[in-house]
Image (cartoon, rainbow, N blue to C red):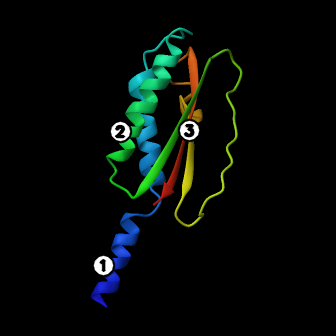
Amino acid sequence: EKMADVEDQIEDDNSFPSEDIEIKISEVAEEVLKDAMWDEHKVPQWINQINEKLMVSLMSLNKPYKYVVTVVMQQKTGAQISGAVSCYYENTTDGVVVQTFPPQSRQKESTQKTLQSLITVFATRF
């Protein structure tokens, strides 16, 4: 009976970490973009920074997952950023997290007024 409890705990520890991923996305996006002013020449650099920092941050979770990170960025002109993702995976273990920066819920009070980003993390368990 104790072995089953341990196995359940291990299984729980390795469940899809959606909340952890959401936190990591927010932290990295805030770090890279909070004081950025739109500059089309800096966009590739910002995207690379987010991709690299987020991947390192995700790997630090020490979960049995492979990650794919995508970042889309545009100048903030009043138009909403939107996108869609589709994937075929195992629903019980794999997942996807999509977040905007600044988050939709904090658009009005955000100090970031010149750009917006759509960050997606796909996670598949191995």
Residue 64 position, x and y percent, is 39, 58
**Disc with the residue nearer the chain's start (1 vs 2):** 1
Q: Quadrant of the C terminus?
A: bottom left
Dot label at residue 70: none
Name above or below for residue 117 compared with residue 39. Answer: below
Q: How far apart are labels 3 and 2 at the CA level? A: 18 Å
Look at mark 2 in the image and give the residue it sits on.
56
Horizontal relation, residue 125 to residue 1: left or right:
right
Q: Amino acid at mark 2?
A: Val
Viewer-proximal residue, 39 or 62?
62
Name above or below for residue 66 compared with residue 125. Answer: above
Dot label at residue 6: 1
Q: Are marks 1 and 2 in contact (CB under 8 Å)?
A: no
Residue 24 position, x and y percent, is 41, 41
Q: Residues within 10 Å of mark 1 (few under 14, many from 20)?
A: few
Horizontal relation, residue 59 to residue 113: left or right:
left
Q: How far apart are labels 1 and 3 at the CA level? A: 34 Å
**Disc with the residue nearer the chain's start (3 vs 2):** 2
Mark 3 or 2, closer to the camera:
2
Q: Secondary structure at mark 3?
A: strand
Look at mark 3 in the image and give the residue it sits on.
99
